[in-house]
Image (cartoon, grey):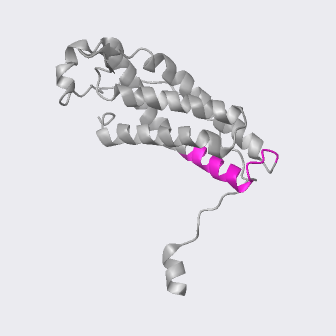
Amino acid sequence: MAAASIAIGSPASADPSDPPPPLMPEFVPTASNWAPQFPYPYDQTRKNVTDADINAEREMCQWFNARYHDLRDQMDKFGFNLLQANNDWTVGTIQAQADNVATNVEQAVAFLTPRTTALTISQDFAGDMYFPIYQGEPFYRLWQELSNVGVGIRARNTAWVYGPSQQRVKRWASQIERSRVCDQ
């Protein structure tokens, strides 16, 4: 029995009295050699991809690679701590944690907003909307759900209320990662 507990290690802990996570500095994209990918069927929509699409995705990829994982970890830790406090915002440093996480989420949303809204959205022959640039939709959906998370935290919602949006953030981020669109 002792060997099993040693192999597993100590469980992660949630503590409503954890210090607030650090505020992230403003993200400033830099020049890079990133170029969009055009795997099938995006090779068919290449003619609809604009320079604005390419610049937007280039900068969103830089942000994603530099900041997403830290932001995700902050959101997760805060959610666990809030649950440990039984969703009581007056326990420990929950409010200070919420303020910093919400500020970091809002800063990410502010960075992503002009870029996601610059993406071209087209219609196919059936009238369905699509993004001509590869992985444009996951970035757009990530931005939408991050916005929901920030609003949920600022509104002092329980972790169960804003949690689904946070899970969708992870889902869209996972699609971005698995596509390797930001590799280069």
- Residue lying furthest front: 126
Q: Give left or right: position of 145 versus 177.
A: right
Is residue 26 visible to us here?
no
Is residue 85 visible to us here?
yes
Q: Give left or right: position of 47 versus 133.
A: left
Residue 110 horizontal/vertical position (percent) = 56, 22
Rendered residue at 31%/14% (across/down)? 122
Q: Give left or right: position of 184 versus 4.
A: left
Q: In the depicted view, which residue is nearer to us: 119 or 10?
A: 119
> In this rendering, is residue 70 above or below 6?
above
Name the dominant secondary structure of the magenta segment: helix
Q: Which residues are magenta?
A: 73-90
Residue 160 horizontal/vertical position (percent) = 63, 45
Rendered residue at 44%/29% (across/down)? 141
* Rendering quarter of residue 9: bottom right
Rendered residue at 80%/51% (across/down)? 92
| Magenta stretch: includes residue 74 | yes
| Magenta stretch: includes residue 77 | yes
> In this rendering, is residue 17 above or below 130?
below
- Residue lying furthest bottom: 1
The quarter in which the C terminus is drawn is top left
Rendered residue at 74%/53% (across/down)? 86
